Each structure stands twice: as structure tokens, then as C-alpha cells.
Image (cartoon, coloured by chain):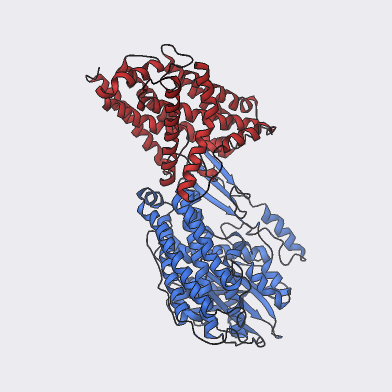
Amino acid sequence: MKIIQIILILVLSPFLSGVINRTKAFFCGRKGSPIFQLYYDIYKLLLKGAVYSSTITWVFIAGPIVSLSAIILAAFLIPFGGEVSLISFNGDIILFIYLLGLGRFFTVLAALDTGSSFEGMGASREVQFAVFAEPALFLSVAALVRLTGKISLSEIFDTINNSCWAEYSPVIFLVLGAIFIVFLTENSRIPVDDPNTHLELTMVHEVMVLDHCGVDLAYICYGSAVKFWILGSFIVSIILKTKHIGWGADQLIFILAMTVLAFIVGLAESFLPRLRLLKVPHLLIVALALSILALTLTFRGFK
Amino acid sequence: MNDKCLIINNCQAKMSKDIPIIGFTEFRDSVITETQIGARVVSFFAKVKEEGRFILVIVLARDKEGTLAVFSTEVKESYHSLTLDVPQVHLFEREIFEQWGIRPNGHPWLRPVRFHQPYSEEISKFVENRKARSAKPFLRISGQETHQVSVGPVHAGIIEPGHFLFQCHGEKVFNLEISLGYQHRGLERSILSAPSQRLIHYMETAAGDTTIGHCLAYCQAIEALADCRVPLRAAAIRGILLELERLANHTGDLGALANDIGYLPTTAYCGRLRGDFLNMTAYICGNRFGRNIVRPGGLSFDLDFSMIKELIKRLEETFEDVKNAVSLLWDSSLVVERFDETGILTKINAIDLGIVGVAARACGIERDVRFDFPTGIFKFSQIPVSTHSSGDVFSRAFVRWLEIQRSFEFIRDQLKNLPEGNISHEIGNINKDRTVVSLIEAWRGEIAHIVFTDNAGKICDYKITDPSFHNWLGLAIAVRGEAISDFPICNKSFNLSYCGHDL
């Protein structure tokens, strides 16, 4: 069963990008690209070779591989539809966050390795945002740990599902707020970053992967899709109260909930402009503040 | 004020010998005094007198009086640069130096403008000059925490080529240097040797998105030189075409601005609506950019009653949609926040640099050829000047919206009250030894065509000044001190032409 869950995550992740794009297209009055477009793109890219600049070192080649591996490993730790994750142990949340950190670290290194001024700017922006986003995620998780008294992801979500919603909702709302902002930042969505822009000077994540092509780019596209899924399921697992109707039904509800989340992201992108780049840290500080507040509340009598 | 100058109106042909040639010191003082009391440099260029001797001609616009002052001086191989006293001429002096090798002594930044061969290539000493000029490097800053970002000439979007070099400290831009010339086709020189039937096609492609603007400027000049009066009906339809061009481009620009900040609703609708306006032009003349219609003497296509009815219907429908799409911009506080106080060009800088068009009006300067130097239909039916004073991206976007509304009203009124009559008069012979300055407020700003004829009635000098030529430095000044990530929306808010600059 757990193996099937992992396979589901790995297979379904690129589907969500199709949902977002179709939502945006719908609100623009366009037809939009096929809902499975990312699958086609990844397939096409996998068939291609890669071109490397003469200035790069092994770091550039390792970047996409390491970050994809880190993200897939993180996917092993994330519970799915109220079930226990494939790998689950006490303190796996620390590993989870650091795996995401490792992925980012190698993406940034690979970007710097090209020596391009664009990629340097993108790397600097990515790290600048991470300085706020990572602590926000850490503190949110710490608040959840305090709230539930558990220190493994599966158990935390299980406890929230069964008992905490009614009793501790303020903490959960604050954590959800913080994690949603982190989720948008990490996946470079509007209002933090514009995944569709062609303007290198304004890009954050996209500009770091400008020099990658072929198989490497396929890894990056796929890695982003899986990352979207695992951080999204972080949110969905908190909100969605598992009914325990049966394994298949639970999974189906979870997948539907993920699709709704992608739809909401698409909706936000349809109606919100991007923030001024220099103001993005303000938004991230809000996430940080929410998570600090949540953690403080858990110290003040909320268990 | 200098009395030794030729005072003319827009599109008024005069004998070339009426342009006074004064001593250089007097010339220099006159330009400085005139610009200090509010005149603006329309164009500044060199004409060959005889080998090694040149006439520098300057055309100044006295906007408040609605007159143009033209005077000239004679120089040999160098003169005392005016740039430090009259910053507006900085690019003109560089242009003259590049074309003829006439050195403006004391010019602070004598880089080539378009990187082409000098016009007087055959003279060996200029080849030497050219080598020296190409060696002039970009401005650089140094320091451990500074970096430079070079963008272009090939860009990610479907736009023209141009090289931008940013000197940055983190996200902050210290200096932006813009280097163009990749679109240089040698238009001004080709005009002199081309058969006269081909000229109109050169004008149509001088800057493809301003086809009507450049064609009108050219036709007005030729008509003035040939003493040909355009029928009123043709003048009205020309006005309609010019304003349709403005509507299409302004609508497209507002959509492109929304696209640059990732605001989808306005982007998606304005992209389509721009096409609707272009299709209206195509409905009149068969070409979306208005080629093949404006001709010396009048027009080559007329409107009949059913076409007018159809045009009014389309215009009203499209305008209603534009209104909805654009109001989405102003209703979103996040969008307004993004535009506000981004890329400010101060009024003082705008006046010093001689900025024209939307960019000038967005700094609160009332500068509009349709109002200050009206020709054609604008003599009878004036469009109010739209200004906004903050000088930022918001201001430039908002002025566009104001102009969209006014152009819409103008076109509707003209279509409803279109005068009867011919659409074209036979163009006679072009008069000999004449000079004319023809100005048009195209959608980007003032287009100036200055034409000289020789003693056979043939064009012997043709100078085109596109609004972009004045405004590119305005963009570079506006992004100083801004975040580099804001450059794209600053650039889009100016939306200058590369080929119009490069010619």
C-alpha cells in the first residue's frame, strides 16, 4: 500500500501543473495547454541530450540530480490520505525540511556555477527568500509538534485529524497561513515569482535554471512538480479530516483535495499581480510572524 | 530671444536661403538662451556645404507660441560642444560626430550612436576617427559588492534588438547604459538616392508600429513643398487613422504592462482588443498597420456610408471592452502599488532632456504637437492634452488611458461628421530650394521630418527624428536608483522604438 502511495505521488505530481494552467487559461478566456502538457514536456526533454557550457564544473551537472533526489526522498516522508508515510520515524520532520534545503542548496550552487550574471541574481534572490521561508516552516512545524506532542510527520497529521481541530484551531489557522505563504514561495508562484514570465531580470527560480537543458531540465521540471505536491499535501493533510472510509476512497478524496488546492493556486494567479520584488520579504516576514505567534500560543496554555 | 532666426509654423515651406547662417559663438549663445526660456530642441543635424565644411542646423520648438525657430552655423571639423549647457542635444551631437566626424569638443560621453560607417568614409582621416570612436568603452563602476548585468541585444521576448548594460549594487541600479544601432538601415541616406515613388515605402517601415505617423509626417512635408492642399475629408480620415494607431498601441501597452507584473486579466483582454483596433485599420485600408493608405496629396482609400456605420459600431464595442479591461488595473490596489513611484522621471529632468510624447505628459508637461502645432484636421478639432504629474510608471500608464478615451471620442465625432468631398488632390511639382519642418504627434510622441529640396526640386537632405531618439535617455535616467527587477515595467511604460531610433 505504501509503495502504491509513493507511486501515486510520483505519477500524479505533474498533473497539478496542468490544473493550474487550465484554471488560468479559463479565467483569461483562453483554451489553454493540454492538462497533461507537463508529462509531454518531461517526456520530450528526457529524449534530448544536454548541452553544457565550457565554464561549468561537476556541480552544475550534479545540481538537478541532487535536488531531484532530495525532493523524491522528501516525498517518501510525506503522508498521503491519512496513511502513514513510506518512511516514518521520530524526528523525520527535521530530515524533511533539510532535504528541501539540500535541494535548494544544489540548485543555487549549480546556478552560481554558470557564472552568468542573471543566474547569480536569481541565486541571490532565492537564498534571500529562503532566509525567511525556512524558519517560518521550521517554527510552524515546531508549533505543530508542541500542539500534538508527536515528532514524526505521520503521527502529527494523524493527531491533528483526530483531536486537535476543534480544540486548537487558532494555532492551526496560524500555521496554515504561514505554510501557505511558504508553499507559494517555495514553488515560485505568484505573488512571489511569476513562473510564466519571459523577463530574466524579474525572475527568481526560473532564471536559475536558464542554462539547463534536455534531461537536466526534465529533472528540474519534474522536481518542481513533486515539490509542489509534497508541500501542498502538507497543507491538505492539515485541513482535510480523513474519514477512514476505506483505503481507496481516502486516497481518492485526498487526490481531489490536491486538485482543489491547485485550482486555488490557479485562481490566485488569475487575479493577483506579482509583488514588487523588494516587498516579497515583507510577505515572508508575515509568514514568519504567524508561525512565531502559533508557537507562542502553544506555550500559553494550548498544551 | 534671438532675432537672427527663421520663424516658421509646422509644415510651412520656406526658401532654404532664409535660414540664417550665423557665427558659431552667436549660434551657441542663441541655443542656450532659447532653451533657457523654454524652447525645445526638435532636431539638430549637419548638412554638407562643400568638402570639409558643414552647416549645423538646429530646429527649436517654442511650444507656447506654436512656432519653430530654425537657424544654422558653419563649422569645419570641430566645435565647442553644447551638451553641458543644453543636455537635449547630447545625442544629436553624438549622431553628427558619427555621421560626419565633426567633433563636439568637451562632449562628456562621445560614444557612437548606431555604429555605422561615417557618411564621409572616403576621406581617410575619418576612418582614423572611427577606430578611435569604437574603442570608447561603456561606463563601469567598480567595487567588491558591485556587479554588472548585460542584457541583449537578443532578448527573450519578441522584441527588437538593443543592448542594455546595468551597473548594480545588489538589486539597485546605479547606471544603465543603452547601446542601440542594431536596426540601422541607413534610411536617411537611402531616401536621397531612391526614386521618389519608393519613399513612401521607406516611411511605412521607418518604425513599423508608427506607420501612419511617419507616413503622415512625410506626406505633410511633401504637400507643403508642393503647395498642395489636402481635401478636408482626407484630413479627417488621416486624423482617424492616426488616432486608431494610438488606440491600438496604447491598449497593447497597458496589456503589456499588466503582463510584466503577472496580472493576467488585463493582459489577456488588452492583447485581443489591440488586435480589434488594428483590424479596424485593416477594415479601412486592408493592412493592420495602416500601410498603403496615406499618400502625398491625400489618401488611397475612401470610406463609404456602410463602412462608417460598421466602424462606429466596432469602435464603440471595442472601447467598452477596453474600459472594462483597463478599469481592472486601477481597481486592483496591488497593481497600483506596483506602478506607483516606480521609475520616476522628474519634470526637471524631462525638460532638460527634451522628452516628448506620453513620457513628457506623464511628468506634467503640456507638450502635444496636436495642440501646440496643429496640422490637418487638428486645426479644426482639437484633442485636449492629457497629463498627469507624478512621472512614474503609473503616470505613464494613466496618461495612456486618458488618451485612449480622448482618441475614442475624437474618432467617433469625426466618423459621425465626416466632411464630403474628394480624398485626394493631384500633387504638383515640388518647389525648388525649399525647407520644411513637418511635425506629427504619433502615439509615442513627436515625429519630426525636416526636408530640404535642391535647385531642381529634388530632395537633397532629409532628417527624421523619431520620438524614441529623444526619450531613450529618459528611460535610463528613470531606472537610476530603482531595483533592477523593476526595469522591465519601466521599459514597457516608455515602450520606445529601436528601429525608429536607429533608422
Question: Residue A19 appears at what percent x and percent y?
Answer: 49, 38
Of B271 and B394, nearer the camera is B271
Colour seen for chain A = red
**Location of residue B466 with respect to A172 vertically, above or below:** below
Lateral position of residue B40 relative to residue B195, left or right: left
| Residue A129 percent across, percent down from the top left | 44, 33
Q: In the drawing, does residue B420 fall left or right of residue B133? A: left
Spot the residue most to the top.
A90
The answer to whether residue B173 shows anywhere in this view is: no
- Return the residue nearer the eye: B260 or A84: A84
Q: Quadrant of residue B275?
A: bottom right
Can residue A243 be seen?
yes
Q: Is residue A230 above or below residue B185?
A: above
What shade does chain B have?
Answer: blue
Above or below residue A73? Residue B111 is below
Where in the figure is residue B288, as x and y percent of width and height?
59, 66
Residue at (77, 63) in percent of width and height? B124
Quadrant including the C terminus of chain A: top left
Q: Is residue A148 left or right of residue B94?
A: left
